Amino acid sequence: MIQILIIDDQELVRTGLRHIFDQSHEVTKVTEASSGEAALRQCKKKCPDVILLSINLAGLTGFEVTRKLKRIYPKAGVIVLAAHAKPPYPARLMDAGASGYLTLDCDAEELLQAVKTVAGGQLYIGSDAAKQLALSMFSGSASESPFEDLSAREMEVLLKITDGRRVPDIASLMCLSPKTVSTYKYRILGKLGARSEVELVRMAMRYGLVENT
């Protein structure tokens, strides 16, 4: 039997997911968390088999939560639930330790199959994400997204920059020195051919990594 931890900051989403799992005879217990920070505390207490993680959390990014959850409880399989499978999200989240990746348009049957597969110690990639991962293996495919060459750590820094955070704040949140964060920042600028943080934000909006508000 499978124990699940759902991490999403929207109560309606958590309720819908819980309803799906309540209909399954293979899920014994569902625990919920509304933030990455709360999830880290829950994971220490509940020891879930599978963690269903929304990528769009306030505070800690999906990359950070995935990495920290795997460090706290490596036996748990993390399935990322995202709005899209645009590169480089699937590949970088798998690099960070995720065992599965699904988009929000998947049906209940696929969600349950993913949970069972990951609980069994295997990987599960939804069809959209699998297509993106397969394309990234061919030379020249990275040109579809300028962010493809960024590491998972660089993606974390990029997302915090696009969220308007300053280097000292990012350093504090990521438990890094400001000098290290600055090094990541200039490495990102160089890889993307951007000249400023403003240009980074515009690029991220153009490719759908952040919302254009």
Image (spheres, rainbow, N blue to C red):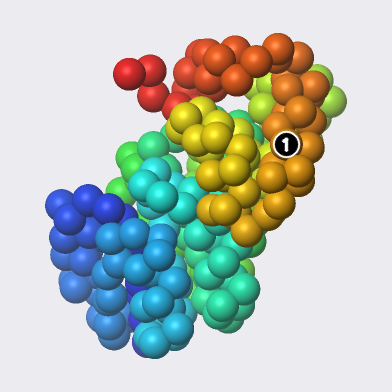
Q: Position of residue 30 (x, y in %)?
A: 27, 76
Q: Which residue is nearer to you in this view: 147 or 125?
A: 147
Q: Secondary structure at mark 1?
A: helix
For the C terminus, the image quarter is top left
Between 179 and 161, the one nearer to me in the picture: 179
Residue 68 visible: yes
Residue shown at 21% from the left, 66% from the top: 18
For this orientation, the residue located farthest to the right is 139
Query: Which corner quadrant of the image does residue 141 belong to?
Result: top right
Numbered label tally = 1
Q: Residue at x 54, y 44 (%)?
A: 169
Residue nearest the viewer, comparing 106 with 157: 157
Q: Which residue is mark 1?
A: 182
Left or right of 165 in this view: 28: left
Q: Of the residues shown, which amino acid type is indicated by label 1?
A: Ser
On the image, the x and y values in percent for residue 142 come to 74, 24
Which image quadrant for residue 191?
Answer: top right
Q: Residue at position x 53%, y 69% from top?
A: 69
Circle 1 residues within 10 Å: few <14, some 14–19, many ≥20: some
Q: Is residue 9 above or below residue 149?
A: below
Residue name at image x 29 percent, y 85 percent:
28
Work out whether residue 201 or residue 98 is closer to the camera in this orientation and state it: 201
x, y percentage for residue 54?
39, 52
Horizontal placement of 100 versus 139: left or right? Answer: left
Q: Position of residue 98 (x, y in %)?
A: 58, 59
Q: Is residue 138 above or below residue 200?
A: below
**Image height of 187 relative to 130, above or below:** above
Q: Quadrant of the N terminus?
A: bottom left
176 lies left or right of 108: right
The answer to whether residue 129 of the structure is visible from this angle is no
